Image (cartoon, rainbow, N blue to C red):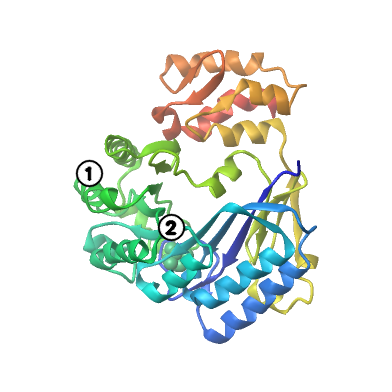
Amino acid sequence: MTKSFGLYFHIPFCRSKCPYCDFYSIPYTEEQANRYTEAVLRALSKAPERDLPVDTIYFGGGTPVLFGAQRLLTMIDAVRKRYVVSDDCEITLEANPAAMTLEDLRTLRKGGFNRISIGVQSAVEEQLKTLGRLHSVQQARESVELCRIAGFENVSVDLMLGTPGQTEEAILRFCDTFCPVVEHISAYLLKVEENTPFGRQQMERFCPDEEQSADLYLFAVKELESRGFHQYEISNFAKDGLHSRHNSRYWDCSEYLGIGPAAHSFWKGQRKYFERDLESFSTAEDPWQLWQLDEEGGDFFEYAMLRLRLNEGLRFADCRERYPEINLAPLKQQAQQLIQHGLAVMDEEHIALTVQGFLLSNAAIWRLLEVYD
Ligand code: SF4
């Protein structure tokens, strides 16, 4: 049976730029949006292979909901012409509470979208202002309600951790406001990137320090777990069976095609990407001519590194099946030290990091895998 793959569309437009954000996006205009839609359709008509099964599609950005239902559904139609979209395909749209209408949501739901991921970030007005968000807490709460009315049964919200002035109380308020009404929560620690306004203002001076951020993360994990949101990845929590199937591809080294400037792909054993350049992508007759090779991918080191981000960790039987030549003994030996420090657990079948291990994931994963580098 042919293996299914995932499709990612990068929609690089936002109303305005949040001062912490390093994602590739530019201000939205109708004209650019039309031109970009044409470019995406051109890319789809020339995309690698055809008739392959697709079982996850993800529209990220940027703020793809700004594109409106019609443009997004035109893209989905084009996907259906090129590939075989499975009946249970997970189709996710990233959305912003300041840019959602009930009419669009209803049309998208009817057109096959079945998952919405909303960039909420905080349930404290002051923090939303600091983060440069264009919405209020109430708007964020109402946007979840709109998704429900439109028929979405799988709604995710983002929570940002380690933001300036954040306290446990703020996390509690977020959980009280959103846990009862959503199925999935992504909780990311803010990283102040140099090339952003936050970076230039050296906002890290006002953020909780490393130890305080670690405490906030552990507090959030405990709160979310106690409310039925099971941690399945370092930053992701879901009610039973409602993990993001698309994002899970990334952590399982499964194939996906990314379309649009700044979009990455893992395809036929290679990591590829498009440059952060909307103009070239929009004007190319064949955007795939711009597809760059990053590196060969999918070796044991990379697979193990990604799997160790997951709660279920690295299953030895999967390793033996995918990489029969790999000797797992050195990894199991390296694991002893982490286990002694409470950073990992291991049994006959698998090894996984603990929540404490997630906090030190880069160092812990390197310690486990350095012998395979
Ligand atoms: S809305 Fe999202 S993608 Fe756009 S600038 Fe803000 S954080 Fe970045």
For residue 277, what is the image quadrant?
Answer: bottom right
**Residue drawn at (69%, 47%) of the image:** 4
The residue indicated by pointer 2 is 117
**153 vs 237: above or below:** below
**Residue drawn at (27%, 35%) of the image:** 226
Percent of width and height locating residue 295: 75, 47
Left or right of 305: which side holds 130? left
Identity of the amino acid at label 1?
A: Glu
Identity of the amino acid at label 2?
A: Ser
Q: Which residue occupies the extreme bottom position in the image? A: 31
Percent of width and height locating residue 296: 76, 44
**Residue drawn at (40%, 30%) of the image:** 355
**300 vs 118: above or below:** above
Q: Nearer the viewer, mark 1 or mark 2?
A: 2
| Residue 281, visible in the rendered structure | no
Q: Quadrant of the C terminus?
A: top right
Q: How many marks?
A: 2
Q: CA distance from mark 1 to mark 2?
A: 24 Å
Q: Which residue occupies the extreme left position in the image? A: 169
Label 2 C-beta lies within 8 Å of the nearest ligand 1 atom: no
Q: Quadrant of the N terminus?
A: top right
The residue indicated by pointer 1 is 168
